[in-house]
Image (tube, rainbow, N blue to C red):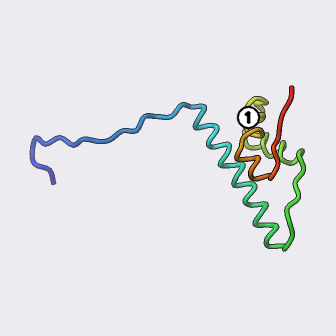
Amino acid sequence: MQPVGATQTRLVRPTPQVGAVFEELAMRKTRQRLRQLGRRAVASGRKVQTNLGELVAAAFDTVGNEVKDVAKLLASRELGRAAHARIVLVQ
């Protein structure tokens, strides 16, 4: 219990930008999807083979119909590491 008249200070973190939160959420969902595919492959005893079309479809499922966001997600380093290949998009 605090004495009467004492004030309590609370540390407040600055709120991140909306785009950064959206990007992080999209990356988290994509990593989760790739982890699920990996677990499924381990359970069946074989490697996961995904093609570029499946990655693009998963990115659209994760991000929505925003082409720029999908391109940013596919070109990210984390997805490149997970796929063991660098994806370069050209418009």
Q: Dividing the picture into quarters, in which one does residue 77 lie? A: top right
Residue at screen point 75% across, 55% down: 34
Name the spot of residue 28 as percent of width and height, x first: 65, 49
Q: Dividing the picture into quarters, in which one does residue 45 lie? A: bottom right
Residue at screen point 62% across, 42% down: 24
Q: Residue furthest top?
A: 91
Name the spot of residue 4 as percent of width and height, x first: 9, 45
Count of marks overlaid on the render:
1
Residue at screen point 90% across, 50% down: 51
Q: List the residue tagged with mark 1.
A: 72
Kind of residue indicated by mark 1: Lys
Left or right: 44 in relation to 29:
right
Left or right: 60 in relation to 5:
right
Circle 1: is it few (<14), some (14-19), or many (20+) Cα within 10 Å?
Answer: some
* Residue 1 or residue 72, whichever sits in front: 72
Q: Dividing the picture into quarters, in which one does residue 67 lie? A: top right
Name the spot of residue 63 as percent of width and height, x first: 72, 38
Name the spot of residue 61 as percent of width and height, x first: 77, 43
* Residue 79 or residue 34, whichever sits in front: 79
Secondary structure of the residue carrying numbered label 1: helix
